[in-house]
Image (cartoon, rainbow, N blue to C red):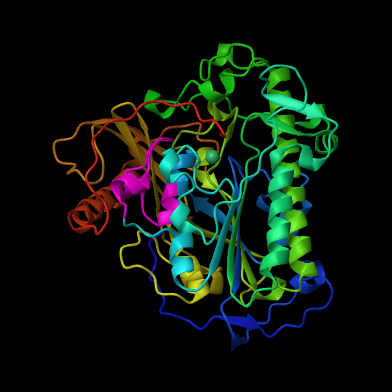
Amino acid sequence: MKTSAIGKFVIGIGAFTLSGSVFNEECAAENNQTQVKLKGKPNILFIAVDDLRPVISVYGDKTAKTPNFERLAKYGITFNRSYCQQALSGPTRASLLTGLRPDNIGVWTLQGNFRKNNPQVVTLPELLKNNGYETIGIGKIFHPLDNLKFRNDPQSWSVPYIKTSAPTYMLASGRNATECADVPDNAYEDGLIAQAGISWLKELSKSSKPFFLAVGFKKPHAPYVAPKKYWDLYERDDMPLAEYQQMSSDPVLYAYHPSNELKVYSDIPPFHSYEDTKHLDTATQKRVIHAYYACVSYIDAQIGKLLDELESQGIAENTVIILWSDHGYHLGDHGLWNKLTNFENSTKSALMICAPDFKRDIKTDAVTEFVDIFPTVCDLAGIEKPGYLDGESLINVMQYPEKSKTDYAFGQFSRGNIYGYSCRDSRYRLVEWIENFRTYLPLEGKKIAGIELYDYEKDPLETTNLANDPKYKRVLEKMKRELHSFYSEQFERSKHHPVAEKFPLTVKEEIDTDE
Ligand SMILES: [Ca+2]
């Protein structure tokens, strides 16, 4: 996000009175902004959700049954336009947790390892640990396919990473994309992750040391398996199919992919992502979407358990909660499934921040980036930010969410040797597809192989690529200036970057797994 950073501020507890549930509606109505100094640093509960497109009620989804996301939203601020830097677990998590863009840490794939390229980079939990925090990691925080030696980055945590394990499937029906089994929450791993989170909240609440507890849930990542009671919250017939399942007009083919991540499952019939006569059949689409919503409600319930425990330990009023999904998701829109694109649904991610001394129950349309999370946490914890971070603190947005913004979010996703870079403002998105380019290379002489321009005010479903529409010439030029200015800034930065090395231009296509 491009916005003026504010100076250091005094972290404080709001002067509100807590009566009953901290997360209930009555308390959420409190908006007292009086700030007093904290005696100590706030605890931080850092909740990650894998592959969650914000099909949750807080983001206006009409189908989702997600009461605990709502509960959380009433306690803080919901970012309606929060964009990840690259829509794949490994890169987005490495970027968020180092505060650096993928081109600056050299992580673009599931196998990418930021320690290999930047052994001295300080991760967010590591920085907190170095500043007096007890840092605990549970579930999926870093992408686990990082080099085994660095799996979950041991130096980030105060104690060895907390491992949980459960079978992926409860039913002996092969490797299916969906499963509905009448089992308790803890039969699947996310129930165990929540349980471990609760145990650690009990333990950590006894300590005088502030904690950073990172709890990473693994659903709704495929396969979409969840206990039956969450399936039962929905009717199959009510499941919303993607309204627009075609490629955009005047398409750039690099923007699309074959949705191989879904195709690997044995209960998915053959289909073609973007040939509209060969799309996934309606019954399978509805089953997958039903399963996805069931998984979202399953995670919602696990989040509720963590909130309950925070309250019962009496530490909610001194705990910042940050909830993020690592990227968005395609559910049949453009004919696409999974993620791995520069489109809106793949890049727009859930982000909610609940800090006791800030305005509550509010939403912001400010355009923000995942690299902004690292410096925001630094500010919330009252610790000095490393000078090399790529993002900017969101504290001013939290203080003035109603202010109109002229900010930009930059993202990337590539197809082979064609590198797609995206610039999103509050209305438009420009994507340039460029041969053999990364932002640490000069753009000069590079071949631009395709351009997309979307106007979300008039066309939220990206049905029309406006890049060649004469009526949008000025918009195109403006967005291009922003994107090219970003390239130049990054190129200059790469010459002096304190941690990044130069990386070879090699990328292979991968199928994401949650293990
Ligand atoms: Ca993911």
| The quadrant where residue 45 appears | bottom right
Specify whether 299 is left or right of 80.
right
State whether residue 198 is above or below residue 452: below
Ligand 1's image quarter is top right
* Vertical relation: 262 (above or below) 296: above
Q: Is residue 155 magenta?
A: no
Q: Answer with the quarter of the image where residue 116 lies.
A: top left
Q: Position of residue 73 (x, y in %)?
A: 69, 61
Q: Residue at x 24, y 40 (%)?
A: 503
Where does the magenta region start and end? Answer: 94-119
Q: Left or right: 180 with respect to 100?
A: right
Image position of 23 with respect to 165: above or below: below
Residue 80 visible in rendering: yes
Please give the count of numbered marks on the rendered protein.
Answer: 0
Residue at x-position 36% and y-position 26%: 508
- Tell me, yes or no, if residue 86 can be seen here: no
Q: Identify the residue at image location x=66%, y=67%.
A: 204
| Percent coordinates x, y for residue 171 in the rendering | 78, 23
Q: Nearer the viewer, residue 349 or 276?
A: 349
- Residue 278 in percent (x, y) is at 57, 12
Residue 97 painted magenta: yes
User: In the image as oriented, which residue stretches furthest toward the left?
Assistant: 445
- Looking at the rendered image, the quarter that the C terminus falls into is top right
The N terminus: image quadrant: bottom left
- Give whichever of 259, 430 is nearer the camera: 259
